[in-house]
Each structure stands twice: as C-alpha cells, then as structure tokens.
Image (cartoon, helix red, strand yellow):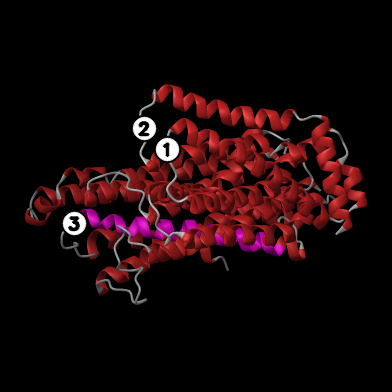
Amino acid sequence: MAEILRNLKKDIRVEFRNPSALGTAISFACIITLAVSIVSAGIPFPPMIQAILLWIILFFSAMNALLHIFTREEEEHTALFLRLKISAESIYISKLIFNAAFFFFIEAVVCPVFIFFAGSSVKNPLLFVSTVIGGGLAIVSASTILSAMAAKAGGKGTLFTVISFPLLLPALLVSISTTAVSIESQDFIEYNNVFFLFAFSAAIIAISLLLFKYIWIEE
Amino acid sequence: MKIGRLVYIFMPAAILSAFLLAPKAEILGDSSRVIYFHVPLAMVSVISFVYAGIISLVYLLRGGALLPEKARNSAGIGIVCTALTALTGSLWAKMAWGSYWNWDPRETSIIILLLIYTAYLSLYASLENNTNRGKICSAYLILTMAVMPFFVFVIPRVYHSLHPDTIINSEGVIKIETSMRAVLLISAAAFVLLYIYLMDIKNRLLNIEKVKHE
Amino acid sequence: MNKLKKTVSFLLLSAALFFHPLFADTPLETAQNEESADNGALWNVLLIVLVVWLGLAAYLFRIDRKISKIERELHEE
C-alpha cells in the first residue's frame, strides 16, 4: 500500500516537471471540439450524433494521452529500477490510479467544452456524468495494461490505438447509446448500462492485475 | 495418424453434397447453398480464436516450447476465415435482405473478431526483436478472450438479430430440416478438418525450423 | 509460410466469390424457374468450386509430401 502511494507521488511529481503531455492531450480534445463546432456552423446535432462525437473525441484523446506513462519509463530508462524495487502489482495499481486521475481531469475539461459548443442541454445530468465516469474508467483500465504492451513494442501510438480499439469497442458502444439517452430524456431505465460499464472495467482490471507481471518482467 | 489428411475426402464430399444432395430452401432457392460454406467458415474462425486463447493460457501458466508461434499460426488461419465469413455473409445478405451490411449483432461480432486478429498479428509483428514476445502476445489474447465470448455468444441470443433462429435460438434446439442438417454437418466437418490440416502443416514447419536452427 | 497463406486465402476467396452468378436472380424467380437456366448456372458454379478445391488440394498435398520427406531426413540423422 505504501509502495503504491510512493509510486503515485513520484509519478505526479514527474508529470508536473514536464506537463507537456497533459497540455497536449487537452489541446487535442479542445481542437477537435472546436473544429467540429466551427464546421457545423451552429446547426444543432441530434443527440445520437452528439454522443458519438463526444466519445470519439474522448477515445482519441485517450489514445493520445495515456500512452506516455509507460513509454516515458522506457525512454528515461527508469523502467529497470522500477522493476527491481517494486512488485508488479503495485506498479500496475499506481499507474492505473494515475491514468484514471489524468483521464478524469481531461474529461472534466472536455465534456463542458463539448456541451457548450454543441449547444445542447443535458436532460439527465446524473446519467450523463455516471456514463462519462464509467466509460472513462473502462477506457483507462484497458489503456493501462495495453500501454505497457505498446511501450514494450516500441511505444508507437498507432500500435496502441490498433490494439486497444477491439477491447474498448463494447464499452464505447454502450457509453455512446447511454449518453445519447441522457441527453435526450429523463429516463432512468438505462442505469443497467452504467453498471455494465463498471463491471466491464472491474473485469479488465482484475485480469490485468493477474497478467501484468508477465508483461512487465522480462527474463 | 494425421486426422487432417481426411480433408481430402471430406471437402469434395461436402462440395458435392452442398450442390447436389442438399434440397433447395423455400424462399431463397439455390442461393441458400452458401450456408454450407458461410456457417463452417464462421465456426472455424471462432475455433481458431479459442484454440489460440487456450494455448496462450497454457503458455503463461506452464510454459512450453513454440506455443506462442502456434497461437500465431492459428490466428493467421483465423483472420482469413473471419474475412471470408464476413464476405460470404455480406453477399448472402444482399441476396436475402437486400443490403450488403446491416450491423446486426452477429455481423458486429465477426468484425470485432477480425479487429482482434488484426491487432494481435500487428502486436506480434512489432515485437519482432523482443525476447518477451510470447508472454506479451499471450497476455493480449487472454485479455481479448474476456471480451469476445460475450459478444459472440451472449448478445446475438439476447437482442433481436437479423440472423435466422434456426441454429441459435432460445430453446437450444436445432430447427433445421434433416437433409440440410446432414449436409451442414459434413461441410462443418470438412472445414474443421481443413483447419486441423493447415495447423498441422504450419506446426510441422515450425518444428523443422526449430531443428534447423540448432 | 506467407506464400502458403496468401495462396490459400486467394483460392478460398475465389471459391467464395464464385457464388456471384447465383445472386443475379431474385428469390421469387429462382423458385419458379426450377428446371430451366438456373440449373445450368448451378452446374457451372459446382464445377468451378471443384476445380478451385482440386488446385488447393494438389498444392497442399505437395507441401505435405515435401515436409514429410524433410522430417524423415531429419530423423535419420
């Protein structure tokens, strides 16, 4: 437990030393939102299209932002020291918490900007927020372990996107349809989908915990 | 005793019976004969995925020589079969339902399987120089095994689907005419044997390469 | 191995694509013109699929024999 907190503090400190990754991720998300909004010239989108656009923006921001946490280790060659000192599970949990905080921060910036520029009003804010959190958690839980794999394979962003898309597709589909419902109406039946997203994240986190040491530790 | 070699008997038998023995379907007529190729191809796609997943699990738990390479061979056959399933299915869809692609749950699951295979093969190829390649790729397959069965087996049976209910239905009974069922069985056996034969050849080549390297 | 895979996929693809003639007919017409031109198309497709399979089988057979020969040589060493 103490190891996890220590690792987390170290990651946060390194991140603030060079906040370029955070800045790039947020700029990327805002640029896409602005681009879509400018090109549509103020014509309102139907809720389904808004949901699709929001999640595409969030997905690609994640692809951009969540890779650096492991590639930075590989580049700065601190990976070997980490491997020696701390157990694989602790590393995984600390990276997971860091990624989650990182991505929730990005979502907290992107979602209001998106809603503002899309000119929509969310009719069911509780469902909207819980879907964004659930979907975000799903994206983060898959991305953490997959970014470790992609970092071992050379740290290319394209490979990371290719391997994470099939895993995240179910979560994305569910998030999109639930977000569309939350924008449209005040229905409460769709809460099963939010539970599905949390359950999906939990399943992936559980499997990743077991698998992480095979990826991280080389012989 | 190599079972795969039986494909030389089964496949011509399957082709001949698909065209000559099998009766015409009621509404679709002769074009329904594609079922004897489409369904077995889909079966082989799923079988090769499950096989690759299982040997990945065995490799991580117990280790074993050449297992990741065998998983990669299985994925190689699987991706071709998945692509062909999607192709034959979409041609048949044009015939039966009027449009080439509908994002029906089953169709979506086959596309997801195709994406998983593509991702796995890309990962395998880009880890060329890494000694830990086997473990990383096996871990990826196990991760996707958690996702895929849900999509392929659960969702099409729960949600309304364009695919007919004859084989996948809530009663668990195969509702298809007996003569068609017999031909479908022969065809399924033929394609599974083809898969076994191709895997056999590829694995033997792997062993030969390994021996030659020493 | 890549060549084998490419050839196999090409042959299987051609086999699948050769169903194309059948899709020229609409469902209703097919049911009614049972004895006429349709059967001709059916025979043609059957023949083509058989030829494709024979090509594939010959190729696989050749590879199988070559591999068996190499394995026997390796065993004798």
**Alpha carbons under labels 3 and 2: distance apart:** 44 Å
Comparing A117 with B70, the one in front is: A117
Q: Secondary structure at mark 3?
A: loop
Q: Residue at x 32, y 48 (%)?
A: B102
Give the x, y percent position of residue B35. Answer: 31, 58
- Residue indicated by mark 1: A120
Tag 1–tag 2 contact (CB < 8 Å): yes
- Label 1 is placed on what type of residue? Ser
- Residue indicated by mark 2: A44
Comparing A85 with C35, the one in front is: A85
Residue B8's place in the image compared with C53, above or below, is below
Chain to which the residue tagged by mark 1 belongs? A
Chain to which the residue tagged by mark 2 belongs? A
- Label 2 is placed on what type of residue? Pro
Comparing A167 with A93, the one in front is: A93
Which image quadrant for residue A111?
A: top right
Give the x, y percent position of residue A142. Answer: 64, 50
Q: Please provide the residue range marked out in magenta.
A: B31-58
Q: Residues within 10 Å of mark 1 (few under 14, many from 20)?
A: some
